[in-house]
Amino acid sequence: MRGVASRATQSSASVMPARLRALYTRLLEAYGPQQWWPAKTPLEVIVGAYLTQNTAWTSVEKSLQNLEGRGLLTVEGLREVSEEELRIHIRPSGYMTRKAAAIKAFIALLDSYYGGSLEKLAEEAPEIVRPRLLELPGVGPETADAILLYALGQPAMVVDEYLRRLVTRHGLLPASARYMDIQQLALGAFQGDDPATRRQHHNEFHAVIVEVGKRHCGRVARCEGCPLAYDLLNAPIG
DNA sequence: CGCCAGGCCGTGT
DNA sequence: ACACGGCATGGC
């Protein structure tokens, strides 16, 4: 017997996902499908996911071009390049020491468990892949889920700072909500859909959330060009 | 100039 | 378990 708190939680468990889905629908109608991730290959998605950690995407693009121009945006290229040289190429995206080591560690995982094949990695069950990714240096829950969803085609749900603000500021979850709390809520918003549709919604949700964040013009004041972004992300708490 | 960007990690309570 | 600072660089 768990009392009123339990009943309140169970009630929230059904209504909050519906409210979140309504917010998602508004965003999608306002901004349109985003066709994410902005990359040509799964490996480019993965490298981009590392590089974009706390970093503007424009900076990531510079690094990706540095790698692409030298033929290093391949598994073999990243395997053969020295970590020292890799640092130089990814320098525009910051944290070059950590990120170079992290990317090297991913290639090492790919080689030791999957024969250097991203296809084999994608065939592995996400329940196995996610914890393996999380053991890697420089991979937290958001990077792991971004790789699962956008590079490996799994129905993962990415929780970023913008989604956290969306759900807390609209009172769907308390400000103390953790990553997995928010992820469970977001997964619940689409659990009625068939798997393929669900994966597509997960894809578009994170994509449109980031698009809103990009257009938001800073988090303090209302921006003339993006009133919807302000309303959805900077809504009064509760 | 100061703040921020599509986080993660080590350390101190 | 949780808060907090450091990590590097470039854009605005």
Image (cartoon, coloured by chain):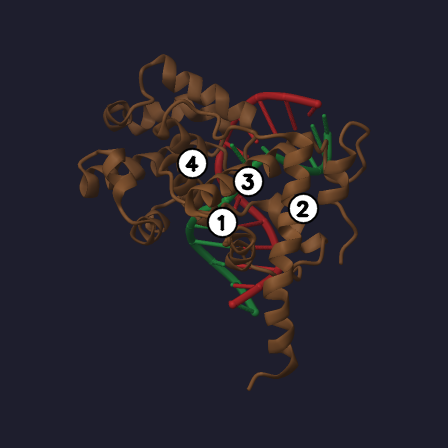
Chain colours: A brown, B green, C red
Q: Earlier in the sequence, mark 1 or mark 3?
A: 1
Which residue is disc 3 drawn over? A206
Gap in angstroms between the C-alphas marked 2 and 3: 13 Å
Q: Residues within 10 Å of mark 1 (few under 14, many from 20)?
A: few
Q: Name the subunit of mark 4.
A: A
Chain at numbered mark 2: A
Residue A168 in picture, x, y percent from top left: 67, 55
Q: Secondary structure at mark 2?
A: helix
Q: Is residue A132 visible?
A: yes
Q: Earlier in the sequence, mark 4 or mark 3?
A: 4
Q: Please tell me how crowded label 4 is: few (under 14), some (14-19), or many (20+) other residues with Cα within 10 Å.
A: many
Q: Which residue is mark 4?
A: A150
Q: At which x and y percent is residue A59?
A: 53, 24
In this orientation, which residue lies closer to the viewer: A230 or A93? A230
Q: Are marks 2 and 4 in contact (CB under 8 Å)?
A: no
For discs 1 and 4, the disc positioned in front in the rendered view: 1
Q: CA distance from mark 2 to mark 1?
A: 17 Å
Tell me the kind of residue under disc 3.
Answer: His
Residues indicated by labels 2 and 4 sit on the same polypeptide chain: yes
Under circle 3, the secondary element is helix
Marks 1 and 3 in Cβ contact (< 8 Å): no
Residue A1 to residue A229: above or below? below
Q: Is residue A165 visible?
A: no
Q: Earlier in the sequence, mark 2 or mark 3?
A: 2
Q: Say which amino acid is labelled 4.
A: Tyr
Q: Earlier in the sequence, mark 2 or mark 1?
A: 2
Mark 2 highlights which residue?
Answer: A23
Mark 3 Cα-neighbour bin, 10 Å: few <14, some 14–19, many ≥20: many
Residue at mark 1? A193
